[in-house]
Amino acid sequence: MKLQVQVSIVDVSTTKKVPVQDFKDTTFISRDTILSCHLGVDQHELPDDRGEAIALMSKALLSFLKKRYESGNLVGAVGLGGSGGTALIAPALRSLPLGVPKLIVSTVASGHTAPYVGTSDLVLFPSVVDICGLNSVSRVILSNAAAAVAGMVHGILMESNVSDETATKPTIGITMFGVTTPCVNAVKERLGKQGYETLIFHATGVGGKAMEELVREGFIQVTFSWNFDDKTQDLRQQCLFFVEFLMSHSFVCI
Amino acid sequence: MKLQVQVSIVDVSTTKKVPVQDFKDTTFISRDTILSCHLGVDQHELPDDRGEAIALMSKALLSFLKKRYESGNLVGAVGLGGSGGTALIAPALRSLPLGVPKLIVSTVASGHTAPYVGTSDLVLFPSVVDICGLNSVSRVILSNAAAAVAGMVHGILMESNVSDETATKPTIGITMFGVTTPCVNAVKERLGKQGYETLIFHATGVGGKAMEELVREGFIQVTFSWNFDDKTQDLRQQCLFFVEFLMSHSFVCI
């Protein structure tokens, strides 16, 4: 099935203003339009300081994407940037809900990505060469990135509204850490038999933060983290005690 | 246009062996098959040491993917892993040529990704939750990742064999670093007018390594890196001198 979506090019430049222009099959959204989403109608001025200008444009892009998404006019977002561009675009894309396709072709995809990705599903696509015009390498990279976004958007639009059997049951977030895997799996299995959905988070890196984020977003109603400080207790006992507790008590939303 | 490709599930487990099984529409490739690619026919034994076993399986996967690609039976590769799984799969996927769709749904996409991505176009797709069964979050993530790979593979298969005008001309790699952007752009413009293709690399992070990699792969025939040590010379003068040099001399392959 062939699907078509309207593609808009969004100008988030902070140096010189790009003149309003329409390309074949795409809409051009000027930076004035983006800025007025955040600052209000007819307010398009950027601060002279480059850092302040970038921070303001990033917030304005966030407001713009939020409005577009909430009005049902956004199915995916793709950015393109070096380290500065990625820092400007990432917070705005990250603010879109989990599952909304979000991707940045970036020079900083191979490096310390946590400041850009955080606990989100933002995909950083390695640019390999610098973002500086078309050449034999960037043509390959940009084609693949565009095809990836097209695939994701196609998937979202084709998605059937299958009802989620577990949607009405409380979801439990559990942290897992290497050696605790067998025990967490046992907890997961037992909770699963009782009809509860579990989400497992790796207790290294951003796993814990991701769990907290999903609690805030309402995906998770109950959490269970190992207490490694209390070494006098057998982990398995703690775990079984916890499951018994869950089975005999009502869940309390946190 | 509807395209169909054969999907194979590859077992790279290093702990217990998964029994050979065929799923609907997919082929299951056992770890014995993978190991025999590297060790030789009928040699399927893994070392007892977990680290050694993972290292061996990683090399075996690399050999398997290489053979599949070289025989024209591979159009893309997608992996799934925590930190251990990502470390096992990444070198094998990275070894596939630039442009071959390669993606890992990974718990370590938000963090220090350079050891996994290196200078390649390997995409790390954040798993958000741990790789541990299906739930309301992982269903969304895995659907998007699968759709992204499907989009990329579709793009590759649909790609028309448009001849690259610049393919027969030497390609020049240039490093760029913030303040040198205007000058590098001037060099690029001037070289472009003469019909040479330029590839720009950010001189921070992995840019320089990526350039070296593309030199080794034969994408780049000439390189130009700024010499920041020599502060007595005007950068613009150096740059113009370089361009004059290029214009008046034959290129020498490095």
Image (cartoon, coloured by chain):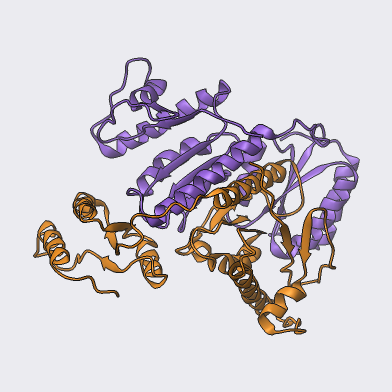
Chain colours: A orange, B purple
- Residue B122 in view (yes/no): no
| Closer to the camera in the image, A206 or B200 | A206
* Left or right of B166, for residue A2: left
Quadrant of the frame with the N terminus of chain B: top right
| Closer to the camera in the image, A125 or A37 | A37
x then y, percent, for residue B82: 37, 48
Q: Is residue A142 above or below residue B180?
A: above
x then y, percent, for residue A81: 66, 60
| Closer to the camera in the image, B6 or B223 | B6
x then y, percent, for residue B72: 58, 23
Q: Is residue A47 above or below residue B174?
A: below
Quadrant of the frame with the C terminus of chain B: top right
Query: At 72% across and 83% down in the image, what residue appears?
Result: A47
- Residue B109 in view (yes/no): yes
Q: Is residue A3 above or below residue B232?
A: above
* Left or right of B52, for residue B5: right
x then y, percent, for residue A250: 19, 71
Q: Quadrant of residue A163?
A: bottom left
Query: At 68% across and 34% down in the image, what residue appears?
Result: B158
Total of numbered circles in the picture?
0
* Left or right of A35, for residue A156: left
* Left or right of B77, for residue A34: right
